[in-house]
Image: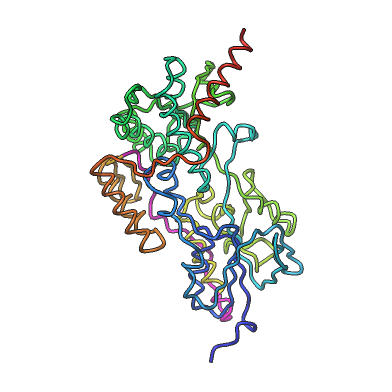
Amino acid sequence: MDKPQASLPHVVIVGGGFGGLYAAKSLRNAPVKVTLIDKRNFHLFQPLLYQVATGSLSPADIASPLRVILSKQKNTQVLLDKVVDIDSKAKKVIVEDGEDISYDMLVIATGGSHHYFGNDQWENDAPGLKTVEDALEMRRRIFTAFEAAEKEPDPKKRQSLLTFVVVGGGPTGVELAGAIAEIAHKSVVEDFRDVDTTKARILLFEGMDRILPPYPEELSVKARQSLEKLGVEVKTKTLVTDISNKTVTFREGDKADTIPANTILWAAGVKASFMGRVLAESTGAELDRAGRVIVEPDLSIKGYPDIFVVGDLANFPHQGERPLPGVAPVAMQEGEYVAKLITRKCQGKTITPFRYFDLGSMAVVGQNKAVANLGFAQLSGFFAWFIWVMAHIYYLIEFDNKLVVMIQWAWNYMTLGRGARLITGKTAIYANTEVNNQENKLELVNN
């Protein structure tokens, strides 16, 4: 006979991303009561956010309501709220809108946000890509730029509208730059009458000596070659020093330069969510420079064996020379591990420390173009792209998402189309007026 829910150990999970969701799903048969708290009511498949930002997919294609995902788990409750503090002594979670929630074991999986390295004032001019709202804002800026260029008679202003700068040469930056190049040089070429979209400039800035720095050098070179074939100008060893008034100031070695660009997108860094600071104040947990919590080999906080941190918020320094990367597979495995540990703990058993099994890393550059480091093999081109497609469809949470994305990708593959090109929020007219106003202000200052 099952124990009543009230007598079971209470596991509270904060965050419904990959780490939190995989922990919750893995506890479905555990002798515990689970409460998952998130400020959003859906799980977002972040690896495909760039496809929303570039018009290939709609937000609903890569998001699933948490209640739907967990509806059949009778030991699990989902709460829509924001956790604002942790009382580690009283073992309570303080939420923004509701009563404190007591826990026996706590899993924190609140992820990260954009990192502007001390230049947070750049955020309005150069949005990052972490949320659905970020993706929709990027999509608005990208497609509004083409609309505004269609109406702009001044060649200089038109070129500024058709200049796109992506800051950061990691997977997100590479994927964004490649997708924008395909939009400008393939997808929308026939859609405009007074502007030649193939004249668009797409620049990718990376501070290191090559793009995709964590990848083997051979794959970085192939990714760069693929981007350049698409028309992307790749600038490595390049540091952005200022972003303002629709311009980017950057330094290559000893040379400084400025380029007018209507659309600037940020993909250069990630910092931990504010929950890192909350945990540091509540438990004395040690944080790294990005605000991530340095965890023990079992993903717990030192001195607090009942509090676990997984995903992008965790710094796991116990495997290899560097901490584990902030990617979805790491969060998934960490969430599953913590669930297994909790289950064994309830049974009076122990398990070995966490160890990440690296299934490889992939980055798509464009249609039929990707790079994949599988450990035992390094692939590029069509085969890497095909593996990337299959892997992402496999890991989408719900069946209907898998089906919709597969059909949409098949259609896009045949037509080179981007059917989710809706411009929402500010209108194209507003954006064009905003650009002209900015340039008029600059002219007044210069005069």
Front-most of residues 324 and 104: 104
Residue 203 locus on image (x, y percent) = 43, 27
Q: Image point 39% across, 34% down: which residue? A: 180
Give the image location of residue 41, x and y in percent: 54, 60
Q: Is residue 197 magenta?
A: no
Residue 159 falls left or right of residue 326: left
> Where is 221 relative to 161, above or below?
below
Which residue occupies the foreground of this view, 22 or 321?
Answer: 22
Front residue of 48 and 429: 429
Assign the C terminus to one quadrant of the image.
top right
Q: At 54% from the left edge and 24% from the top edge, which residue is drawn? A: 246
Foreground of the two, 331 or 365: 365
**Residue at 35 percent of width and 50 percent of height:** 375
- The relative height of residue 74 versus residue 320 in the rendered view (above or below) is below
Report whether 387 appears left or right of 87.
Answer: left
Residue occupying image coordinates x 51% and y 43%: 129
Specify the segment rendered in magenta.
343-366
**Left or right of 212, for residue 366:** left
Most extreme residue toward the top, as rendered? Answer: 447
